[in-house]
Amino acid sequence: MTAQALSSWVHGGVDALGAARVDFSTNSNACGPCPPALAAVQAADATLYPDPLYSALRQRLAAFHRVRPERVLLAGSASEFIFRITAWAWQQGVRRVQLPAHHYGDNARAAQAWGLQRAADGAGALVWGCEPSSPLGQAHQPWCLDAAHTVVLDRAYAPLRLSGAPSLSDAQLDLVWQLFTPNKALGLTGVRAAYVIAPAGASTSQQGQIDAAVAGLNLIAPSWPLGAHGVALLQAWVMPEVQAWLFAYLPTLRDWKARQIDMLQNLGWTCLPSEANFFCAQPPQPLDLAALRAAHGIKLRDCASFGLPGWVRLGVLGPQAQALLACGLQENKLIPAHVEHFQ
């Protein structure tokens, strides 16, 4: 595999070195795992195939979002659906993709795999949005909401919004493909499961086009994209007690985030504004991330693969982890930084 191909596989979390002692590199809910969701996953019967049509699960998700069950698609993960809808777009004759300036790497990888060319505007293109965005945790701009665009909105971090408000109304959300991955909000990122709400047709002819798109996307999906544990996670996601648990811990995350930003700013870091449970920050001097992990077991997410060399993304963690980070950063000043890590 080439160096370019390897760089596109960069993610936070566990890697070839295993799990970090203190991991700021993911956007998982640090207050998790959610107890009732974890119990549901642990109780899943892995001896049986799931219903291949996921009929009951789709009904529950549809009721939760107050949409017709026909609008609900299941996916193995956000990444799986990113590649699937990119393949479907190619089948429809789409040859261009519009990406945010800073975006999740799989969006670009899928476009590259299918030969879609990046476009400055979205006319006739597959358009990707994410709100709150990754890695910045900010609002998505600009929006292209008309029939000339196929717009997919990644809403992975919407349940972890700590400030601000969505930039699209409910009526506008009905114009886009909405992609949900609750595992981050529930602190269960090891369970891979996602679902999609298809747009609502504004006219009979447009509804027919959307129905055909849903059928096409289901046709190119693998059988059983979700296993028993993924089904259990999504079933738990819509439970009132799970939603109540998430809502109850948002104030804790807000407090931890404010403390984490204050700590870094006191150490001379520059922190960008964010509406989510993560943010991007730049150290006062180049930081050797590999040395920080080797010496202190602390992992940060290098933002070079997002197009932000010299910056890192930090998920919000609790006070104990923040104290370990502060000590590690202060001690790490004695370690010569390798500037080439940020090139």
Image (cartoon, rainbow, N blue to C red):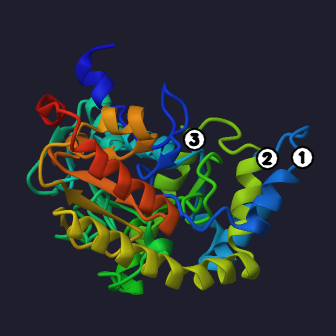
Is residue 45 found left or right of 96 in the rendered image? right
Is residue 94 found left or right of 237 in the rendered image? left
Q: Nearer the viewer, residue 38 or 117?
A: 38
Point out the frontmost of discs 1 and 3. Answer: 1
Label at residue 45: 1
The spot of residue 315 in percent (x, y) is: 41, 59
The spot of residue 221 in percent (x, y) is: 57, 39
Q: What kind of residue is marked 1?
A: Asp
Residue visible at 31% across and 42% down in the picture: 105
Label 1 secondary element: loop
Evaluate whether residue 205 shows in this view.
Answer: yes
Say which residue label 2 marks.
Answer: 228
Q: Are marks 1 and 2 in contact (CB under 8 Å)?
A: yes
In which quadrant of the rendered image does the C terminus lie?
top left
Label at residue 219: 3
How many C-alpha atoms fall within 10 Å of the one at disc 2: few (<14), some, or many (≥20)?
Answer: some
Evaluate whether residue 144 shows in this view.
Answer: no
In which quadrant of the rendered image does the N terminus lie?
top left
The Cα–Cα distance between marks 1 and 2, rounded to whole angstroms, is 6 Å
Residue visible at 31% across and 67% down in the picture: 137
The Cα–Cα distance between marks 2 and 3, rounded to whole angstroms, is 21 Å
Q: What kind of residue is marked 3?
A: Leu
Q: Residue furthest top?
A: 1
Residue visible at 82% across and 60% down in the picture: 40
Query: Relative to residue 99, is residue 340 depicted above or below?
Result: above
Q: Nearer the viewer, residue 213 or 247?
A: 247
Label 3 secondary element: helix
How many C-alpha atoms fall within 10 Å of the one at disc 3: few (<14), some, or many (≥20)?
Answer: few
